Amino acid sequence: MDTFLVNLIAATLRVATPLLLAAIGETYIERAGVLNLGIEGMMFFGAFVGFFVADVTGSLWLGFWVAVLSGVLSGLLMALFSVTFGVNQHVSGLGITLLLGGLSLFAFRLKYGGRSVPPSIEPFPQLSPFKDVPVLGTLFEQYLFTYVAFLVIVPLAWWLLYRTSFGLNIRSVGENPEAADAAGVNVFLIRYITLAIGGGLIAAGGAFLSLAQLGAFTHGIVSGRGWVALALVIFGNWDPVKVMWGALIFGGTFALQLRLQAMGLNLPIPYETFLALPYVVTIVALVIAGRNATYPAALLKPYRRE
Amino acid sequence: MDIVQMRGITKRFGPVVANDHIDFNLRKGEIHALLGENGAGKTTLMRILYGLYRADEGEILVEGWPVRINSPKDAIALGIGMVTQHFALVPPLTVAENVVLGFTDGFVLEKATIEQRVAEAAKRFGLEVDPSAVVRHLSVGQRQRVEILKALYREARVLILDEPTAVLVPQEIDALFETLERLRAGGLSVIFITHKLEEVMRISDRVTVLRDGRVVGTVETARTNERELARMMVGRETFGVRREERAVGEQPLLQVERVCAEDDQGLPALKEVSLVVHAGEILGIAGVGGNGQKELAEVLSGVRRPTSGRILVDGQDLTGATPDEFTAAGVGRIPEDRHAGVVGELSVAENLALEYLEEFARGGMLDREAIRRHAEELIQRFQIKARATDRARTLSGGNLQKLILARVLSRDPKVVLASQPTRGLDVGATEYVRQQLLAQRARGAAVLLISEDLDEILALSDRIAVMYEGEIVGVLPAQDADPERLGLMMSGAVKERQGAYAEV
Ligand SMILES: Nc1ncnc2c1ncn2[C@@H]1O[C@H](COP(=O)(O)OP(=O)(O)OP(=O)(O)O)[C@@H](O)[C@H]1O
Ligand SMILES: [Mg+2]
């Protein structure tokens, strides 16, 4: 096979991994009726916490798991505001994005000061099970997280949502919390659990960026990936498998534009045009898919009995 | 033996005392009717028993044991099930999923297993439902069976039904009553809320009457009658309105000419419907629900476009016009779903001004003082029991309907379009609404009354048109109509094209 294509596919999977993790997390949260606009901040915070802990302790894995924990806690914070206090979800979500973004940058400054070269660590290595096989070798040279995201998280997320009583509870709570409550489901508990799980996945997506893909932490490390993940959830109609296709489409265009830039084609258009390409594709995909989107009916509505 | 005892239950919503030291006992194996005006506190009391509200004071005993019910989960564990006034189902899920929701053993859900289990339960309780059907596609009667099955599947020994008959057609009510009698024979205890005294007499063993949040009394059904119950409920014995015979005006205010329309699925819902309503006349549209009444009301208010035909209001052609244009032409609409007719989060005053905001605007700004004055005047005139600042969603059914009547009728519309105007209302509020419609007739308005309640149609109409499968199958002058004849026409057995119809 063409090396260009093989490289492109391999890169697509890499680029799609953090988006996929975050989008699956967000899917669960929204399926239970909460729009989590804290997603961008939670990814950023996850990226920072992961990097910071790994740098200080020297353990990548400790960094990763503490990052996941930070995501769980941010999810619970979102739950406290939007579920328990019933604060408007737009306000609480954006508040959390601003809070976590600011907190990360502040802590980064305290620790690393105003360096011109960002601090870096030795990142997670890629696995290469088919090292010397020509095509497969490139395709399967991926991070463990990529394998887990595509082969474990997506099928598991789908199975949990559609084939278990836990998933039934989540779907009901997001569609009609009154009905779920009257049937004996604890609406608050389900929303807390999904925010905790979702927050953990979102932060894992962020930690993937700093601990695997980059091995560094920069201000622009997330650069809107949280918002893209938010769009992927709509594109995927709140179904984990369809969300995965969305992540692949976005990852593909992103990887493609990187290559187009690198090829240094002498085109009479500025390179920023290529940078914008994945976002344009996202918007177009959203416009097409969004028209048939069936939102969880209770999205954005805090639940109250009285 | 009392299976449920509620003692001294008190519940306040801000300044409103919805339940005021209520004592209520339910015997094992009885059907116990709970009766009271809109806002008397029936739903509140039952929501407390089901754990959806928490009482401020009082205690609950189940089979003699004091219990704490903090959530529906607790109530279910005690064998209490409830079918709420607005159904609590998840529309995109299947019947089986809705039934087992929150009551599953084991983590993994096998579609086939739960469907089989639900089918078995349905058979055991004699409730006919298809476990694999998606709830969104079910009729109201079928949804109610799912709700009842949901409660029984949880092994309920006490079943609370909050106004189960308000949304049902007569045949479905009969089926429901048969089911209830069978379940009672099997030992189930039922609390049954309704506004229809005739249903209370027919199905219940005992009746408890509430008024303003207090218990007026509990009586054996066999030792009482409708008049006594009415007196307990509102302090009066007789209800009903009298339609004075008077000459109907000559002027046709509403003309519908060979109108066809499709329903949401794109199937024909109205087939060449032709009607005329004159000034000072009430034309009743009788028919079993779902025979095109909803579409007719929508076409006549501009919400649905007819595929062919013409609509004239006082001579003005409004075919295909927008709802705004219908309102401007003098059509006042009392919608079937009164909750959809108001914005729940807005205040009573704002809702009253809603359709005429430009009249309350001063240079692009709303004149809040004028809106308030307008509201206070209408609250007085239409006897709405609410303050101008209350949110519309906290109003009881009767007061909500008065609010809509006030908004529509205070404009002296030429044509009044009333769909199911008294559904779910207590006897007092029902009488009030009917009087208002007759007052519109006396004023010279043309009233189109769409109702599934034959008594209502017979009491108010000058002429009666019967709808069946999207067609007008006959029009009778009021003096020729009786329930039997109308019932036959409603079932599609007789097509009557005589007398008045030729003129239409
Ligand atoms: N959630 C709530 N918030 C504020 N007030 C409420 C609430 N629920 C009920 N009320 C008020 O409590 C009173 C009793 O209401 P409830 O719904 O129990 O009456 P009801 O007897 O069921 O009436 P209906 O026949 O119209 O259903 C009413 O005045 C109502 O406005
Ligand atoms: Mg009620």
Image (spheres, coloured by chain):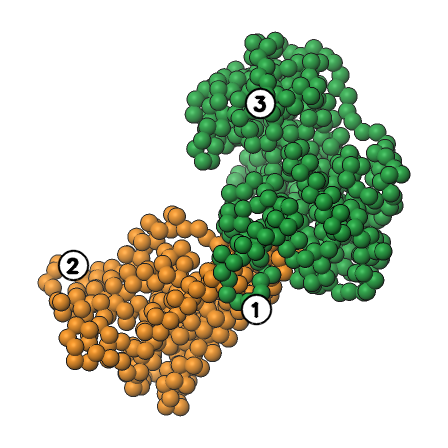
Chain colours: A orange, B green
Answer above or below: position of B217 versus A147. above
Q: Secondary structure at mark 3?
A: loop
Amino acid at dot 2: Ile
What is the chain letter for disc 1?
A
How far across and how far down the image is residue A224, in percent?
Answer: 35, 66
For disc 3, the neighbor class at 10 Å (few under 14, some 14 to 19, many from 20) is some
Label 1 vs label 3, nearer the camera: 3
Q: Amino acid at mark 3?
A: Gly
Q: Residues within 10 Å of mark 2 (few under 14, many from 20)?
A: few
Real-space Cα separation, disc 3 to disc 2, in angstroms: 72 Å
Same chain for the residues at labels 1 and 3, yes or no?
no
Q: Measuring 77% from the left and 56% from the top, which residue is drawn there?
A: B11
Residue shown at 85%/40% (left/top)?
Answer: B221
Q: Quadrant of the N terminus of chain A?
A: bottom left
Q: Are marks 3 and 2 on the same chain?
A: no
Q: How far from the left and from the top, in percent, is residue B365?
A: 55, 42
Tell me if label 3 and label 2 are in contact, CB under 8 Å: no
Give the residue furthest to the bottom. A57
**Is B85 above or below relative to B317?**
below
Q: Nearer the viewer, residue A57 or B197?
A: B197
Residue depicted at 82% across the width and 43% down the height: B205
Residue B492 marker: 3
Amino acid on which the number 1 mark rests in the picture: Leu
* Viewer-nearest residue: B160 or B70: B160
- What crowding class fits label 1: few (fewer than 14 Cα within 10 Å), some (14-19), or many (20 or more)? some
Q: Is label 3 or label 2 in front?
A: 3
Q: Which residue is mark 1?
A: A80
Tag nearer the camera, 1 or 2: 1
According to the picture, the residue beneath numbered tag 2 turns out to be A269
